[in-house]
Image: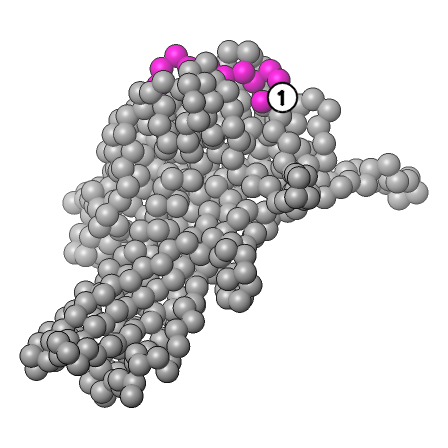
Amino acid sequence: MANSFSKEERVAFEDILEGFQDLLVLSRHVSVYNTNQTEMARTNDTIWRPMPYIAQSIDSTPGTSISSSYQNMTQLSVPSTIGFSKTVPWTMTTLDLRDALQENRLGESAKQKLASDINVAIMNTAAAQGTLVVPIGAAAGDYDDVSLCDTIMNEQGVPDYDRFLGLSSRDYNGLAGNLSQASRSFGNAKSDKAYERNFVGMVAGFDTYKFDYANRIGVAAGSSITIATNGSQADFVPQATSTSVGGQINVDNRYQSVVVSSTTGIVAGDAFTIDGVEAVHHITKASTGQLKTYRVLSVTNGTTMVISPPIIGATNSPTDAELQYKNVEVVTESATAAITFLNTGASAINVFWQKDSLEILPGRYAIPADAGTAVMRATTDQGVELVMQKFYDIDSMTIKYRLDTLFGVVNKQPEMSGILLFNQ
């Protein structure tokens, strides 16, 4: 006969779910895509999610034919995988169960860990793949630091709503300290909250959050490295699909493999700019006058590395796809354009993003309810499922518990998310 939960355990599980949902701070500020679990099982838990279209306009006068101006539209997509399967297992004996509070404490600890796993997965994805890089020469301290994140997003056409900024504790407190200075008038809600509760709130269009953990970036060790921007390498061609032996397959256009003079000292995560390569507004295609920022995703060999985003200059007989997704203006073409690294000091990685750039994909376990194990499941507002199971071993009088969640995280558009680095 299957085990069943007592009323006390059901109440405990409901409390766990409520607290679990409260702790999912980051998942509430990214988009959510609920998948068909049967289809996911048949596709190795991977689905391709579309990136935003970017259309081009032309001048048109009534009475004048535009028959030669119709364009081909290219839909880009990215692979999204439900790749995180997290569980917290524990056991209790029949002697342990005499203390109901002990069971509740263990459930609370499991809930905190799983919520942390989801938050960390989102933060890791943003920190590793965000390509908008804002380096600050000093420690965190004032509004101007955050406003530069707003500026780089605005210049490149990132939507000006649903923007979020996650800061390490030290950097968040540095901003709060600026708001709470004695020179500011008390009685002002913003200053009072900063002084009394160390609260920052919204700054420069970003809802700000404090992380009690944060990724770190090291000092870039690469030096005197150059890259060619006078050929096809600066004219990456976006494509929806490519043809292989097995037929057409989707293409991930977030990354580009480039050849540089040397990859010595370069590591994944490094941020850099390229001389003569300026960012453009993604809609108008007008140059911002600011150098485009890039991230290193991986190092292939002594002269090849994978970067994000790709260099789409659309300079030499560009295709419609290049014109649609052009992201840079190659102002000065060169066979030896200098690479300048931006992470010149070791520091915490603060992440900022627009909600639609990051996405969480909730998963679901198909656990049989008649296999001798008691099963309870519930879903948060974000669609993230939490499953609790219990099994009693009569031989040892031990009860096994496990709390599980299944999910995936994807950065659909790295050019709509970025990192803020202090002390550079």
Magenta stretch, residue numbers:
222-233
Residue 252: horizontal and vertical position, in percent?
A: 56, 41
- Going by the image, does 64 lie left or right of 370? right
In reply to whether residue 228 is colored magenta, the answer given is: yes
Residue linked to disc 1: 232
* Prevalent SS, magenta region: loop
Kind of element beneath mark 1: helix
- Going by the image, does 183 lie left or right of 352? left
Q: Which residue does the image show at 27% across and 37% down from the upper left?
A: 216
Quick one: label 1, few (<14), some, or many (20+) residues within 10 Å?
some
The answer to which image quadrant residue 378 occupies is bottom left
Q: Which residue does the image show at 58% across and 22% down from the upper left?
A: 233
Which quadrant is home to the N terminus? bottom left
In reply to whether residue 59 is colored magenta, the answer given is: no
- Going by the image, does 120 lie left or right of 335? left
Q: Amino acid at mark 1?
A: Ser
The answer to which image quadrant residue 183 occupies is top left
